Image (cartoon, helix red, strand yellow):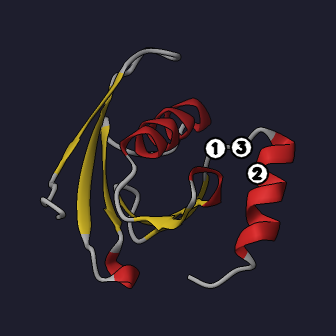
Amino acid sequence: MRYDFEVGRALMTREGWVTILLAFAETPTRWHTRNVFAFGGVVEDPATGAATAALAGYLRELGWPHGEHIDIVQGEDMGARSLLHADIGPKPGGSVRVSGTARQMI
């Protein structure tokens, strides 16, 4: 991902945004996401559980046909493929449980 990092950081700081999630639905339950994280000093985050939870809750509120779960592929474009899964409770405003894979980085 390429963008003017300082401009992105300034925008996110000014607007109070911690992340910007870019998402594409491959199917109703399988999504590909990228997460801009200039606010945190990183161009892109390879796996973002909080953003996945927010997306899942948003889809529930929209009435998106998610079948009470979604799977997220993130970090693929940066060589750090991550797989996240969100179980979406049926109650509006209710809980979302996120799980996934991780790798140790040294």
What secondary structure is marked by label 1? loop
Residue marked by disc 2: 12
Quadrant of image for the N terminus: bottom right
The reply to whether callout 2 and callout 1 are in contact (CB within 8 Å) is: yes
Image location (x, y in percent) of residue 14: 87, 45
Residue type of the residue flagged with mark 3: Trp
- Residue that sits furthest to the front in the current view: 106
> In this rendering, is residue 10 above or below 98?
below
- Looking at the image, which residue is at 38% across and 81% down? 78
Distance from label 3 to label 2 (Cα)?
A: 5 Å
Q: Residue 89's image quarter?
A: top left
Q: Give the residue at x 78% y 46%.
A: 13
The earlier-in-sequence mark between 3 and 2 is 2
Q: Give residue 11's quadrant in the image.
A: bottom right
Q: Return the residue at label 1.
A: 18
Q: Which residue is mark 3?
A: 17
Residues 22 and 19: in front is: 19
